[in-house]
Amino acid sequence: MAFDILLGTLVLGVAIWTVAARDTFAAVIGFVAFGLLVALVWVRLAASDVALTEAALGSGLTGGLLLGAGTRLARVETIATEKPGAILGLSAAAVCALISTGVALIVLLLPEPAPTLAPQVAANIATTGLENPVPAVLMAYRAIDTLLEVIVLLLALLATWSLAPDDLWGGLPGHHDPADLDGVLTFVAQLLVPVGVLVGIHIFWIGSVAPGGEFQGATILAAMWILLSMAGLVDMPPVNRRWLRMVLVAGPAVFFAIGLAGFAIAGGFLAYPPSYAKQLILTIEIPLTLSIAATLALLVAGPPERQASG
Amino acid sequence: MSLALDGLTILAVGAGAFFFLAGTVGLLRFPDALSRLHALTKADNLGLGLIVFGLLFQMDGLLSALKLVGVWLLTLLAGATVTQLLARTARMSGPHE
């Protein structure tokens, strides 16, 4: 109890500090710390799946994206000098207060016991062939949400790519410095990447019985690719490569195809016949993990900045 | 037996927490980037090592104990690397701060 109060206060404190921070870099660091603390909150709520996702995606990957954005902004540097007017500040504060009050009211006005579908999920989980209820919800009962999520990720990547100037369209994202073979980063990339790939696959694979799953596993795989590229051991491929685009769309495409096949074999979009539901879910999840990993890594790499040679 | 194990755990985790506290004080109080990094790595390496060591007595299987040690080793690797990179940047950007 005392720990929870302390944790809650800390989350609030870091949140306020992050909003109040004048420096973009400091705010990003605050955001990453905030995400890790929120992951701890999820652990305290016994939601390890959400905690893993928050730590990997919410804090780690989004933190990386924001760091990249902050570095780009620093070149233009209008953020620090340009102060929002009083009216803008006040209306932002008013809208935030309104939303917070609304959320607080909704939470306080929930009927007791809160409405839940958890018993139904627990009663029917056997038909999905999965043992962890979280992926059962994500891949079976609410598969449509997951499908839309991965499509949104792809759209985000398209939006990032479209920031490239015309002559660089289809080129290579980011910078590439050849690896310093005696450097620390090269050493750690060589040592860590095999371990990280193993952990990523493990987290993905364990998802059907324990906390884990394709998003968390894919984030770790993406992080390993980013580490390799940061160390200069591999270069990101030009974004117009056919194989790359196949990898990116394979997951959503297989997902969609099996969803459509559901009409014929189970009587509905994204419905699975119980006898081989688990096999179908795995068939979706494997390409999906690869697609998500590639999408996330390319999102961090940013828009094309160099001409593709040859 | 379990009382003795609990005692060991409390001792080791307590010592680990002390190193974290000392590392944090060092991070806040030391005058320049390099010595701050030095304080921080002590907390990471020794503090986390002692906490992991203390928790080993509470594990019910060899596999989970190995996983804990794995977490410590990975943190060591990440911490040492990042500290090296930070220290290099700090040195290149000048002696002060």
Image (tube, coloured by chain):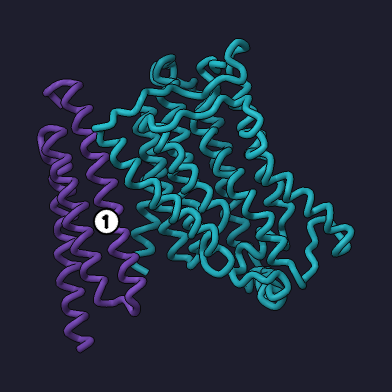
Q: How many marks?
A: 1
Give the chain of mark 1.
B
Category of crowding for the residue at label 1, using alpha-carbon neighbours closer than 10 angstroms: few (below 14), some (14–19), many (at least 20): some
Q: Evaluate whether residue A245 shows in this view.
A: yes
Give the residue type that dot 1 points to. Leu
Residue A189, quarter of the rendered image: top left
Residue A309 place in picture, x, y as percent: 54, 16
Residue at image coords 51%, 37%: A297
Q: Colour of chain B?
A: purple
Residue at image coords 68%, 68%: A115
Residue A130, quarter of the rendered image: bottom right
Instruction: Please state, as top left, top right, bottom left or bottom right, where the N terminus of chain B lies in the image.
Output: bottom left
Decide: is A34 above or below A124.
Answer: above
Residue A95, quarter of the rendered image: top right
At numbered mark 1, what does the secondary structure look like: helix, strand or loop? Answer: helix
Q: Which residue is mark 1?
A: B73
**From the viewer's perspective, is B72 left or right of A140?**
left
Instruction: Please state, as top left, top right, bottom left or bottom right, where the C terminus of chain B lies in the image.
Output: top left
Give whichever of A122, A108 is nearer the camera.
A122
Residue at image coords 20%, 21%: B93
Q: Evaluate whether residue A21 shows in this view.
A: no
Residue A161 place in picture, x, y as percent: 60, 24
Q: Colour of chain A?
A: cyan
**From the viewer's perspective, is B71 left or right of A43?**
left
The furthest residue to the bottom: B1
The furthest residue to the front: A310
Residue A207 place in picture, x, y as percent: 55, 63
The furthest residue to the top: A167
Give whichever of B54, A250 is nearer the camera.
A250
Decide: is A292 above or below A6.
Answer: above
Residue B31 place in picture, x, y as percent: 10, 34
Residue at image coords 40%, 43%: A32
